[in-house]
């Protein structure tokens, strides 16, 4: 049963991935500008021989459906084209900037899950009381605040006025990054056993991660609250209470287990809000990640890079949701039959 | 009014919904008024709407006139200070409402039109059409909104119109999903059958049962998305992919203050404007969602049978 469930989810994810590649292919084909010259620098685009070579390599002289399969083949070989701006393969750019974003997103997610789920539980236990109302404002505030503005305020308060955290970058100026294992400086510095470097990496990471977690906290808080209330209204909870079980036992043993399972599903959605946030937050904190790369590519009309980033992030998003699906199916066997 | 003894239906969070036999849908709306946050939301939105309409009379100065000193700190003359070329920030913030509010309404309307149409077709027709349309919707969901919007806005060129188009491209699928699931869930409930048994024509059932139940939640989602629309639009402008500099748009105003942290007022006040508008929409949307929750509406319907 579980095997078939995983197989069917994998299948639909694969179909989705092909669809995304198709869309990004169409996007490349439809967008203004010659696909061949846009892959080249200005000088190379002036040379008809090079242009012809590129046309042949990417099959641009072939009919559109053939082009798609060539495009697909190139993708499978990891060829996402060459960035016009950096003059490097898009894939190596992604490999360079990806870990920085991943580090940021992971820490933000951990913060958001702890704070958001925790506060959501508190709100549900005090439903409609003053605490609940206050937390409702917190939750709505979290999803309403323009994250780029929050980032600016955070920098102003914690870096300009009080020098609590550094305002930009991943390490202090002059520090050399740890030897690359994961590309995440906090992990790599620990692996290298360099605690000063670790402290520096953490202090650079905290502020952008906190800012980034704000909308996710809002989402998780509200979802946890409503999920808890739904379970609290169940007959079996009333039965447990009627049996005379103490309230905390009822909450911990019977309610939390049922209530937190659906929260997993919202993590996929919340992760999307996180990705959106990285573009703006990385921009402000000078964080050299995928978001900042996407922005610089977009503002330079660096088409191969934009399509590469879009594709990459979409695939990451599908993968995350696939994992969420699996987790949910493993925890709640009823889902597998659906 | 029904007395409490006569079955006061409870919303999921225990707030009683007053119902009337005569106006079942309409009676649920005033519940929003009993919620303080909803009232705050309405006051915020009304204030900004009035400010937007009356901007030429309310704003103390011309939003584009570069008549004053650069980066003047907030004072009695300029409560929000002045910006890099000596424009009055208060006036620009007030005029900014004329950009963000109508565009948010416009782009949500466009998204609802596209999304609800696709969703309704998928839900009604079902089968292969449904499957195909929903896979397309899934596809758009998998693209991260702001990055897709960035790609579209960047390739079309930076302008507010293109930013609106870009956001419509990324936001219609949500309405398609909701409309479809609502149409499907209505087909499965038995109060539609009950209404038919009571002798209602299918047209009457459509108006009386399907329309209010589909329109309500879709409108709630739309009202929630108004806040998100303002956020996305100002976000794109902040990145320089929306409003072009001289115009008074909140996102690009925040952006112009980003490089000059020490002159905090340049970015603070336009950002506060965005925050308050989005918060207003979300306060209102939150209360409407509770009051019109399709699930509570459904449980009310089944308890009546």
Image (cartoon, coloured by chain):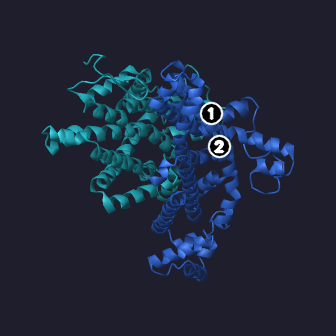
Chain colours: A blue, B cyan
A236 or B121, nearer to the observer: A236
A303 or A102, nearer to the observer: A102
Residue B67 visible in the shown view:
no
Report x, y in % for residue B184: 31, 48
User: Residue A151, relative to residue A326: is it above or below?
Assistant: above
Report x, y in % for residue A66: 48, 79
Q: Is residue A102 left or right of residue A33?
A: right
Q: CA distance from mark 1 to mark 2?
A: 24 Å
Q: Earlier in the sequence, mark 1 or mark 2?
A: 1
Report x, y in % for residue A15: 48, 64
Q: Secondary structure at mark 1?
A: helix
Q: Quadrant of residue A257?
A: top right
Chain identity of mark 1: A
- Which numbered circle lies on residue A115? 1
- Which numbered circle lies on residue A284? 2
Q: Is residue B296 left or right of residue B71?
A: left
Q: Residue furthest front?
A: A243
Residue in view at x 50 percent, y 55 percent: B142
Labels 1 & 2 near each other (Cβ < 8 A)? no
Report x, y in % for residue A114: 64, 35
User: Residue B227, relative to residue A45: is it above or below?
Assistant: above
A280 or B304, nearer to the observer: B304
- Which numbered circle lies on residue A164? none
Q: Residues within 10 Å of mark 1 (few under 14, many from 20)?
A: some
Residue in view at x 82 percent, y 49 percent: A189
Q: Secondary structure at mark 2?
A: helix
């Amino acid at each position: 049963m579980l095997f078939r469930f995983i197989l069917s989810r994998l299948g639909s994810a694969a179909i989705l991935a092909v669809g995304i590649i198709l869309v990004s292919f169409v996007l490349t084909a439809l967008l203004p500008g010659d696909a061949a010259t846009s892959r080249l620098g200005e000088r190379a685009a002036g040379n008809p021989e090079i242009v012809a070579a590129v046309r042949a390599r990417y099959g641009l002289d072939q009919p559109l459906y053939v082009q798609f399969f060539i495009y697909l083949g190139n993708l499978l070989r990891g060829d996402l084209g060459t960035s016009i701006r950096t003059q490097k393969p898009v894939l190596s750019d992604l490999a360079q900037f990806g870990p920085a974003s991943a580090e940021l997103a992971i820490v933000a997610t951990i913060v958001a899950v702890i704070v958001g789920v925790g506060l959501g539980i508190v709100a549900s236990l005090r439903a409609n009381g003053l605490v609940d109302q206050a937390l409702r404002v917190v939750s709505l505030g979290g999803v309403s605040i323009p994250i780029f503005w929050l980032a600016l305020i955070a920098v102003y308060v914690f870096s300009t006025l009080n020098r609590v955290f550094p305002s930009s970058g991943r390490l202090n100026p002059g520090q050399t990054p740890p030897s690359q294992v994961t590309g995440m400086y906090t992990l790599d510095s620990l692996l290298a056993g360099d605690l000063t470097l670790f402290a520096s990496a953490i202090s650079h990471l905290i502020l952008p991660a906190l800012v980034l977690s704000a909308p996710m906290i809002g989402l998780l808080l509200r979802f946890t609250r409503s999920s808890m209330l739904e379970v609290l209204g169940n007959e079996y909870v009333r039965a447990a209470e009627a049996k005379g079980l103490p309230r905390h036992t009822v909450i911990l043993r019977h309610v939390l287990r049922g209530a937190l399972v659906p929260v997993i599903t919202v993590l996929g959605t919340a992760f999307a809000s996180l990705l959106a946030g990285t573009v703006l937050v990385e921009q402000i904190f000078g964080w050299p990640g995928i978001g900042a790369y996407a922005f610089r590519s977009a503002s330079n009309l660096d088409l191969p890079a934009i399509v590469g980033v879009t594709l990459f992030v979409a695939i990451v998003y599908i993968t995350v949701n696939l994992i969420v699906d699996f987790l949910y199916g493993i925890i709640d066997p009823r889902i597998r039959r659906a | 009014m029904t007395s409490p003894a006569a079955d006061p239906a409870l919303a999921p969070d225990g707030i009683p919904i007053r119902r009337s036999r005569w106006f079942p849908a309409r009676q649920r709306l005033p519940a929003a008024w009993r919620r303080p946050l909803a009232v705050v939301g309405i006051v915020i939105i009304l204030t900004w709407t009035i400010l937007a309409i009356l901007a030429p009379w309310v704003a103390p100065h011309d939003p584009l006139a570069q008549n004053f000193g650069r980066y003047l700190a907030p004072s009695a003359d300029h409560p929000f200070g002045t910006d890099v070329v000596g424009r009055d920030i208060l006036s620009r913030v007030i005029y900014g409402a004329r950009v963000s509010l109508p565009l948010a309404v416009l782009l949500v309307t466009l998204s609802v039109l596209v999304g609800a149409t696709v969703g309704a077709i998928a839900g009604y027709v079902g089968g292969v059409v449904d499957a195909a349309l929903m896979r397309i919707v899934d596809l758009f969901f998998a693209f991260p909104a702001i990055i897709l919007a960035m790609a579209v806005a960047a390739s079309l060129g930076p302008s507010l119109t293109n930013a609106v188009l870009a956001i419509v491209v990324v936001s219609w699928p949500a309405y398609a999903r909701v409309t479809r699931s609502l149409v499907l869930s209505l087909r499965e409930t038995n109060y539609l059958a009950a209404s038919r048994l009571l002798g209602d024509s299918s047209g009457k059932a459509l108006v009386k049962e399907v329309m209010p139940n589909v329109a309500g939640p879709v409108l709630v989602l739309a009202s929630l998305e108004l806040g998100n629309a303002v956020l996305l639009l100002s976000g794109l402008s902040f990145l320089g992919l929306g409003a072009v500099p001289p115009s008074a748009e909140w996102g690009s105003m925040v952006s112009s203050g980003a490089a000059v942290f020490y002159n905090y007022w340049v970015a603070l006040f336009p950002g506060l404007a965005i925050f308050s508008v989005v918060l207003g929409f979300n306060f209102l949307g939150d209360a409407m969602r509770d009051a019109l929750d399709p699930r509570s509406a459904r449980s009310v319907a089944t308890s009546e049978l």
